[in-house]
Amino acid sequence: MTTEILKLAAFSDGDQGGNPAGVWIGDALPDATTMQEIAAEVGFSETVFAMPTGDGWRARYFSPESEVPFCGHATIALGAALASAHGDGLFHLVLNEAHITVEGQRQGGLIAAALQSPPTYSEPVDPSLLQDALALFGYTRDDLNLEISPAIAHGGATHLVLALNHRDKLRAMRYELEQGKRLMNDAGLVTIVLAFAETPRLFHTRNPFASGGVYEDPATGASTAALAGYLRDIDWPHGGAIDFIQGEDMGCRSRLRAEISPVIGSSIRVSGTARFMAP
């Protein structure tokens, strides 16, 4: 095992883009305070800490400011790191609140990885929270795509989903970080998902992560799983899979794919590629 912090960009667009994640693998996890300090020092939106346990791996996720129950891009990074160290395969992960899997397959300089999310579910959003969220970004109800109504979506973590009716509205996203942090923490949100449907099976998304002290994530597997589960809940014509382009508007284009079974509430398979970054 190693206690070196590996750095990988998950959900890359070939050998570019992706969301950087730290990966710590050791024989025993440090205490929570130490993990929080390491995550803050690494400075990425999340660092995952993993240790072997039984026939799988115990995993915990930390942003620079807080622990989160599940992080998709860090899970993809962990799967890539495990495949690199132990060979291609399926790895069982024990999270704080769920059991999931991640698989990795080496493909030259890249590693293809896929996770199975925790179960998903969705619920209506409180009108006052919706109003506050619209005000945070300077949006109005006229900017929303009401075919995808605002909702709270869960898939291992909790997210607010706002679907916009124009690509330019997504591109122009701006907000004040401290205000966003207060809103997300008060509402128990890990992120807010802003989405534009170019076609029923191709979405552009942005993902403010103020609750973790991060203005925006360029690729977010947890919110992608939650959004895909919500789209299944509302009978969106997904055809079994949706491709997501994220990070493009922040200069870090990333690609994610969500495969959606017809079973309401079941796990979403989220896949992409990962690349190792310079130490």
Image: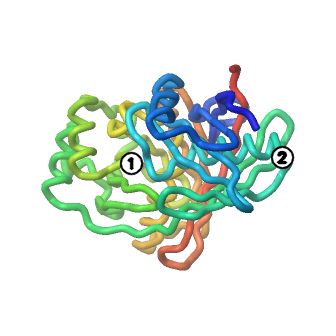
Residue at 42% of width from left, 49% of height from top? 196
Please indicate whether residue 273 sits to the left or right of residue 247 in the image: right
Q: Amino acid at mark 2?
A: His
| Mark nearer the viewer, 2 or 1 | 2
Give the x, y percent position of residue 22: 60, 33
9 shown above or below 189:
above
Along the line of sight, the residue nearer the viewer: 49 or 145: 49
Give the x, y percent position of residue 127: 15, 59
Element type where label 2 sits in the image: helix
Where does label 1 land, which residue? 193
Along the line of sight, the residue nearer the viewer: 259 or 276: 276
Residue at 21% of width from left, 45% of height from top? 134
Element type where label 1 sits in the image: strand
Separation of residues labelled 2 and 1 (CA atoms): 34 Å
Please indicate whether residue 192 sits to the left or right of residue 129 in the image: right
Residue at 30% of width from left, 62% of height from top? 149
